[in-house]
Image (cartoon, helix red, strand yellow):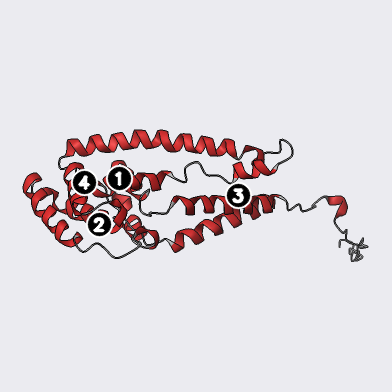
Amino acid sequence: MRLSLRLFFCVWFFLAINLYLENPMSAFAAEGQASPWMKTSTEKLEKELIAKYGEAQRVRLERGLHQVAEFWQVQDGDEATFEDFVRTNFAGDQATLDTMFNRYQHLLEQLFGHMHEMNREFRQQADLDTGPIYPFDEVFAGYDPSAHVVDDFFGNKLAFVVLLNFPLTTLDERLAQGPHWSRRQWAEVRLAQIYSKRVPAAVNLDVARAASEADSYIAQIHLDVSFDRCPRPAPVSPQITPAEPLEPPR
């Protein structure tokens, strides 16, 4: 019962967060209107890079520029910074794209794997019955070591490199087209999905703290289900119906 309640509240909490942020281009993705220079700059870069890499890259380039523009904020830089970033980081040939994908795949596996390991250790005293839980144990359990990662990657523009080169997808697209995708296509989609929301680190920390507090509350609920405390039904005398006498054989 305790585990079921815990799972219910955790699933409900994270579903609520994801429903609120269902649209990748909404919520924290854009705190204000797009910069007035963005449209002109994007059109100029499309012509320039298609001329450089060929018509075959048009769809990827248009999609990548749109994705970057949707998440680009004032603190990310001006028009010159935006244009220099796109020219430097667009993978215009398959070899460069493959190298980029393999590098991200390896490094993010290391990053998120170690973050998960740290989170597991930080929560150990709260999750396992190894002794009393002190206030500082609860602080450790409510801290998410990876809370700053996505925010930092937008800050240093590693997230924008992904958005420029790999596709963001909707749930409907994944359901309709996913069965026909290769492992590589799915991996690219999941890579981009990491940066489909630009949630500030402070919000991620609040989410982790709230989830930990919910876990702690549920962990204190104890339901006594021992058989000796359960009410027992009163004994019922069996009602025996006499059998009909058998007729002797003729």
For badge 1, the amino acid type reads Lys
Callout 3 touching callout 2 (CB < 8 Å): no
Report how far apart the C-alphas of labels 2 and 1 lie in the structure: 13 Å
The answer to whether residue 55 shows anywhere in this view is no
The residue under label 2 is 69
The residue under label 3 is 212
Q: In the rendered image of this protein, does residue 120 appear above or below residue 147?
A: above
Q: How many marks?
A: 4
Report how far apart the C-alphas of labels 3 and 1 lie in the structure: 30 Å
Q: In the rendered image of this protein, does residue 91 appear above or below residue 76?
A: above
For the point 35% across and 50% down, the residue is 195
Name the element at disc 4: helix
Q: Which of pointers 4 and 1 lies earlier in the amino acid sequence?
A: 4
Report how far apart the C-alphas of labels 4 and 3 lie in the structure: 39 Å
For badge 4, the amino acid type reads Phe
The residue under label 4 is 85
Residue 102 x %, y % = 29, 34
For the residue pair 40 and 110, the one nearer the viewer reads as 40
The residue under label 1 is 157
Q: In this view, does 135 lie to the left or right of 40?
A: right
